[in-house]
Image (cartoon, grey):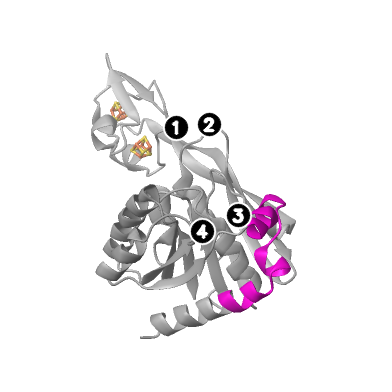
Amino acid sequence: MIISVASGKGGTGKTTVAVNLALSLNNVQLLDCDVEEPNSHIFIKPLFERSDPVFIPIPVVDKKKCDGCGRCKEVCAYNAIAVTNKKVLIFPELCHGCGSCEYFCPNDALKEEEEEIGVVEIGEKDGIEFVHGKLNIGKMMAPPVIRAVKKHISRKKTAIIDVPPGTSCPVITAIKDTDFVILVTEPTPFGLNDLSLAVEVVRKLKIPFGVIINRSSLGDKKTDKYCAKENISILMRIPFSKKIAEIYSRGDSIVEYLPEYKEKFLRLFKEIKKITSR
Ligand code: SF4
Ligand code: SF4
């Protein structure tokens, strides 16, 4: 089973849930797809054994063959090509490496060159297989790095994915083709707004999901009312606790220092299995 742990915004406790759920299970993988700012490794402390660079193909113009017809600009869906005065300009930071421009160029004037945009690191800690992606500084194409991380998913294990925050392209790449999504939120007006956007995305992708309310003892009851109205299961509540905040700030895991949470995460996993088997 593949479980994504997502949130409409950063700072809700998404990584805390992903890490502690992984630490509570056997035969598990934790894949950190928050490739712009991966931080699950801080809490897992894996020993990295492998590091694989991630490349995307970027087109390069052969000026001798190019007649400035502009076909490449027309077919580029990402505005990564400009043609002015019959001169072609390619903006590699916008290029998705889709290959359309090369395919449609009538003069065979485009060739692809591999450009490194990030890295996937693979490691292990106490039986947990750990994989994360890191997007190189200045690069904007998170989805290819996320896909490279997801290639390591093993269907023989339970895979937990730490999803990037928000509701944009990288989030969809991370949660697509997963079996269940945990949406982590906090009971504040901002939290509720971002949760409702994330719910829309997950519903469009038709993936079963449920909500965890973090710092549930703070804020208001509007998240509870929203979930009740929308018929969304609240899978777990994590009340605010100074002890948990201290554990987190030290880079430690909750289940190690508060073992009663291991039981809670195991119950969460059982509940998810029940929902996905319906
Ligand atoms: S499609 Fe080919 S020939 Fe036409 S402008 Fe682009 S690179 Fe040049
Ligand atoms: S490879 Fe795709 S995204 Fe990149 S410039 Fe060509 S058409 Fe645009």
Give the labeled residue for mark 4: 215
What is the spatial separation of the Cα atoms under label 2 and label 1, in whole angstroms?
Answer: 8 Å
Q: In terms of secondary structure, where does tag 4 sit?
A: loop
User: 278 or 239, which is in the foreground?
Assistant: 239
Q: Quadrant of the C terminus?
A: bottom left
What is the spatial separation of the Cα atoms under label 2 and label 4, in whole angstroms?
Answer: 34 Å
User: 204 or 110, which is in the foreground?
Assistant: 204
Q: Position of residue 161 (x, y in %)?
A: 52, 62
Give the labeled residue for mark 2: 138
What is the spatial separation of the Cα atoms under label 4 and label 1, in whole angstroms?
Answer: 38 Å
What is the spatial separation of the Cα atoms under label 1 and label 3, in whole angstroms?
Answer: 22 Å
What is the spatial separation of the Cα atoms under label 4 and label 3, in whole angstroms?
Answer: 27 Å
Span shown in magenta: 242-264
Q: Do the residues labelled 4 and 3 touch (CB within 8 Å)?
A: no
- On residue 132, the disc is 3
Q: Which of marks 2 and 4 is nearer the N terminus?
A: 2
Q: Are marks 2 and 1 in contact (CB under 8 Å)?
A: yes
Q: In terms of secondary structure, where does tag 3 sit?
A: strand
- Is 259 contained in the magenta span? yes
Q: Which amino acid, by three-letter code, is at mark 2?
A: Gly
Numbered disc in front, either 4 or 1: 4
Main SS of the magenta part reads helix
Residue, far top: 85
Numbered disc in front, either 1 or 3: 3
Q: Earlier in the sequence, mark 2 or mark 1?
A: 1
Give the labeled residue for mark 1: 93
Q: How crowded is mark 2: few (under 14 residues within 10 Å), some or many (20 or more)?
A: few
